[in-house]
Image: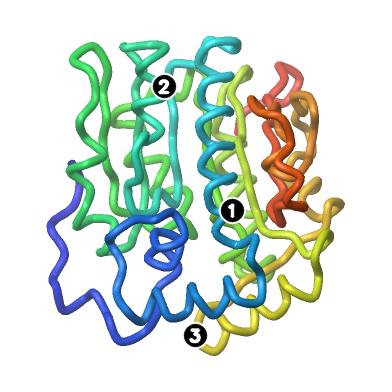
Amino acid sequence: MTGTGPDIQDIDTTRPHPARVYDWFLGGKDNYPVDEQLGRRIAAIDGGAPRAARANRAFMRRTTRVLAEEAGIRQFLDVGTGIPTEPNLHQIAQSTAPDARVVYVDNDPIVLAHASALLTGTREGVTEYVQADARAPRTILEQAARVLDFDRPVAVSLIALLHFVADEDGAHDLVGTLVDALAPGSALVLSTMTADFEPENVHKGIAMYAAGGVTLVARSHAAVGTFFEGLDLLEPGIVSVADWRPEEPPSGEGPVSLYGAVGVKPASRARR
């Protein structure tokens, strides 16, 4: 594992933290009362928020399985990993391909404190954790290259990450730099918040996070599409994460306010 252990003083338990609120939505135990309080307030105005968190995790599992089984990808780079929640990405990938190599990336001391849970992969494969900021994609690529061969296809996952990165803070530079470094046949997996389905509830939730000092960005369908320019979208394209190749019939509980998609890099798009 790259990096050193976190100083407990780096973990602020007096303010809500997005990763811990997300953990609470998923029924996890790695959160504090302040996170639960915000989670309950959000759920009170948007009862679909916990369901969206679960749908997002299910989207990660399905996309990883599709890329490992159908696309034959054996290398995965998960940026903005978050607090580990089983099954983790490497467990999905290595259940299909035991020799899969997985690199997790996060800069959060909370995640680093739990990183050992991300390193329990197969003997045939490799799992590694890199402590780096998502806004430093070149650093991520340099560190990940110790484990991954970027001359071969890599699946880059940005799951529920980009709604914390505004366009003016380099969201497109982040995605573009990562995709430009990938070999043809590589994939970009992305999920991000939208207000297209339930604008009132989403904007209320954004305001609650803002009150806790966290900036969130809700993007339209067209705005999400700009991250996939030059890539070949797998069917069904950019849809609510619950509608991306679902394995169960629709729940009928309403939309999930997260867009998700998978784009594959064609041979015509040169590496930089």
Name the one closer to the observer, 35 or 219. 35
Query: Local crowd at mark 2 within 10 Å, few (<14), some, or many (≥20)?
Result: many
| Above/below status of 74 relative to 148 | above
The residue that appears at 34% across and 22% down in the rendered structure is: 101
Query: Local crowd at mark 3 within 10 Å, few (<14), some, or many (≥20)?
Result: few
Name which of mark 2 and mark 1 comes first in the sequence: 1
For label 2, the residue is 93
Colour scheme in use: rainbow
Amino acid at the residue labelled 1: Arg
Element type at mark 3: loop
* Apparent side of residue 120 relative to residue 190 in the rendered image (left or right): left
For label 1, the residue is 51
* Apparent side of residue 121 relative to residue 260 in the rendered image (left or right): left
The residue that appears at 27% across and 63% down in the rendered structure is: 110
Q: Quadrant of residue 196?
A: bottom right
Q: Quadrant of residue 28?
A: bottom left
**Residue 112, position in %: x, y?**
23, 55
Q: Which of label 1 and label 3 is nearer to you?
A: 1
Name which of mark 1 and mark 3 comes first in the sequence: 1
The residue that appears at 78% across and 39% down in the rendered structure is: 238
Query: Local crowd at mark 1 within 10 Å, few (<14), some, or many (≥20)?
Result: some
Name the one closer to the observer, 255 or 130. 255
Q: Are marks 2 and 3 in contact (CB under 8 Å)?
A: no
Q: Which of label 2 and label 1 is nearer to you?
A: 1
* Apparent side of residue 92 relative to residue 120 in the rendered image (left or right): right
Amino acid at the residue labelled 3: Gly
Per the model, the C-alpha gap separating discs 2 and 3 is 35 Å
| Above/below status of 222 relative to 156 | below
Element type at mark 1: helix
| Above/below status of 144 relative to 196 | above
Can you tell which mark lies on residue 213? Answer: 3
**Residue 246, position in %: x, y?**
68, 29
